[in-house]
């Protein structure tokens, strides 16, 4: 946390009000959690009203792009056509796809099919076929503000087993959201996600998680979904994180493609599903900004 502010200085949040009548009590409350040994967020993870407004504009594009994909995705299409759609729609609305060239990632979107867990390449040689379940993960930059969310699509005739996985993965994300609250902990949602997956006979990927988002693509905190209630970072109003658990039909173990170093698969070859939302912590609850 930054050096303590003078009580009559303008507040760090940019409201223009004096610190003592703005965020002083809020900072004191956070400090009490820190004294009790909890991990707490620094000011850099707490978005100002102006930043939240900018991030919401970015999210509007992200949602519209996923809506467009939902309308146009179909059997027989190449995954690379999803990539072109996402690039075209995002840029037409004035945004830029955050994945493109991010740490060397070569596409505008991730498309992860069946036993692919995440970061699948929407390449020319992937043909979308009946029976596939696919996650389309979109992220947008608008005026320097980032948004991120993903949805699952069931193509043609999907087996009841895979349909159930897709449904339960969505419920896991929703259970995580329901457990998320201001002055609660990240572990509250991790536990809710993992409990729901286990109850349904599934497992949750441990090594890859969600993240803070908004001013960067990936900010602190890292968000695990196998964590315990009452542990991990304190959540306070103004933080934005993603809820994006990867739920596996079989074992939780995964591996990364050795050649491209991006695409992640289940070790046992069984299907995996993921839904992602981007969520703001508010004074009295949460607000979903992108889905
Ligand atoms: N969109 C992914 C997430 O949910 C991140 C993808 S990184 C990329 O965090 F480079 F593959 F795009
Ligand atoms: Co994400």
Image (tube, rainbow, N blue to C red):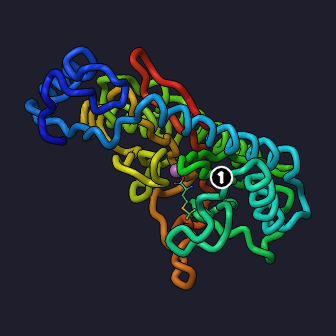
The residue that appears at 68% across and 63% down in the rendered structure is 108
Q: Residues within 10 Å of mark 1 (few under 14, many from 20)?
A: many
Q: Outermost residue toward the right?
A: 76
The residue under the point 46% across, 52% down is 216
Apparent side of residue 127 relative to residue 17 in the rendered image (left or right)? right
Q: Quadrant of the N terminus?
A: top left
Indicate if the residue with disc 1 has its beta carbon within 8 Å of ligand 1.
yes
Residue sitting at the far left: 35
Q: Position of residue 17 (x, y in %)?
A: 31, 20
> Residue 115 at x, y = what percent?
63, 63
How far from the left and from the top, in percent, is residue 205? 45, 54
Q: Residue at x 43, y 40 (%)?
A: 194
Q: Give the secondary structure at mark 1.
A: strand
Instruction: Check the image and report above or below for 209 versus 200.
Output: below
Residue name at image x 45 percent, y 48 percent: 215
- 115 versus 8 height, above or below: below
Q: Tell me if residue 112 can be seen.
A: no
Residue placed most toward the observer, 107 or 190: 107
Residue that label 1 marks: 138
Q: Nearer the viewer, residue 54 or 83?
A: 54
């Amino acid at each position: 946390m930054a050096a303590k502010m003078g009580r009559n200085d303008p507040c760090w949040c940019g409201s223009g009000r004096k610190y003592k009548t703005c965020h002083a009590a809020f900072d004191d409350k956070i400090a009490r959690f820190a004294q009790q040994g909890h991990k707490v967020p620094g000011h850099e993870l707490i978005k100002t009203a102006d930043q939240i407004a900018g991030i919401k504009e970015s999210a509007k594009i992200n949602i519209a792009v996923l809506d467009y994909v939902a309308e146009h995705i179909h059997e027989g299409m190449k995954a690379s056509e999803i990539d072109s759609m996402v690039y075209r729609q995002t840029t037409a609305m004035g945004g830029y796809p955050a994945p493109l060239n991010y740490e060397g990632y070569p596409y505008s979107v991730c498309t992860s099919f069946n036993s692919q867990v995440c970061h699948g390449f929407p390449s020319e040689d992937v043909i979308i076929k009946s029976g596939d379940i696919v996650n389309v993960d979109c992220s947008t930059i608008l005026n320097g503000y980032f948004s991120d969310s993903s949805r699952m699509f069931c193509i043609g005739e999907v087996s009841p087993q895979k349909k159930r996985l897709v449904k339960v993965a969505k419920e896991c994300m929703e259970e995580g959201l329901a457990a998320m609250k201001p002055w609660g902990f990240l572990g509250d949602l991790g536990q809710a996600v993992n409990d729901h997956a286990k109850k349904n006979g599934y497992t949750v990927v441990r090594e890859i998680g969600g993240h803070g988002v908004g001013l960067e693509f990936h900010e602190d905190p890292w968000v695990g979904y196998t964590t315990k209630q009452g542990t991990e970072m304190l959540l306070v109003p103004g933080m934005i994180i993603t809820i994006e658990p990867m739920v596996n039909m079989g074992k939780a173990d995964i591996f990364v493609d050795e050649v491209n170093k991006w695409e992640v698969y289940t070790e046992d070859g069984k299907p995996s599903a993921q839904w992602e939302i981007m969520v703001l912590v508010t004074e009295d609850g949460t607000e979903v900004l992108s889905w």
